[in-house]
Image: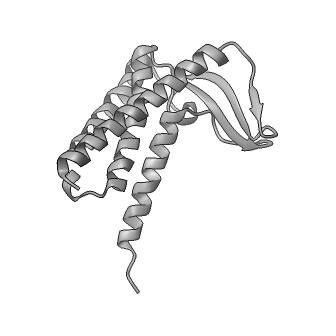
Amino acid sequence: MKRSVKIWLFCVSCLILISWDKTTKEIARIHLMDKGTVSYFHDTFRLQYIENTGAAMSLGDNLPKEAGFWLLCAIPLIIIISIFVYAIQKSEGLSMSRLFAFALIIAGGIGNILDRFLFDRHVTDFMNIGVRDFRTGIFNFADVWVTIGAVVLILGYRKRAMPVA
């Protein structure tokens, strides 16, 4: 595939994934804020609105505002920009699955950073999965994108590192 097409698909993927995240967060703010938990599939999947000022599982929630800005906005943004530049520069030698994994990570990171900038450090989270008391934290699509992207990259690198029999 031509490099220009790969870069175009990569950038469009990033924009679509960021839009999906922003749209679902807005829907959650409209339909879930100030309401109780909505449960589906015998309480396996829950929709529950929260605003998180920390990282995953509210880690760093109590950081002073300036430290939170640097640790949860500025440094992650620099890392995301670096990943974006790397993906563009190396796009010719990267598979589309690896480029899409980078797009997932970039879009997820940007989605949550945009929330932090637009809503005074508050990231909208609204999904929860689990059985009885064994549950995930409450998360959003940006978190899903980053997780899937990281897993795809890790599995891809593991597969390349495994010896051929």
Total marks placed: 0
The answer to whether residue 87 is seen in the rendering is: no
Q: Quadrant of residue 44?
A: top right
Q: Quadrant of residue 73?
A: top left
The answer to whether residue 24 is seen in the rendering is: yes
Residue occupying image coordinates x 41% and y 69%: 159
Considering depth in this image, is 38 or 134 the residue closer to the camera?
Answer: 38
Considering depth in this image, is 125 or 60 the residue closer to the camera?
Answer: 125
User: Along the horizontal axis of the image, is 152 left or right of 103?
Assistant: right
Considering depth in this image, is 38 or 119 the residue closer to the camera?
Answer: 38
Q: Position of residue 36 (x, y in %)?
A: 75, 19
Quarter of the figure with the C terminus:
bottom left
User: Along the horizontal axis of the image, is 84 left or right of 158?
Assistant: left
Residue occupying image coordinates x 40% and y 23%: 114
Q: Position of residue 91 (x, y in %)?
A: 22, 51
Residue occupying image coordinates x 19% and y 55%: 92
User: Along the horizontal axis of the image, is 115 left or right of 89?
Assistant: right
- Residue 31's place in the image compared with 54, above or below, is above
Q: Position of residue 23 (x, y in %)?
A: 50, 23
- Residue 8's place in the image compared with 152, above or below, is above
Residue occupying image coordinates x 49% and y 46%: 147
Q: Position of residue 77 (x, y in %)?
A: 32, 31
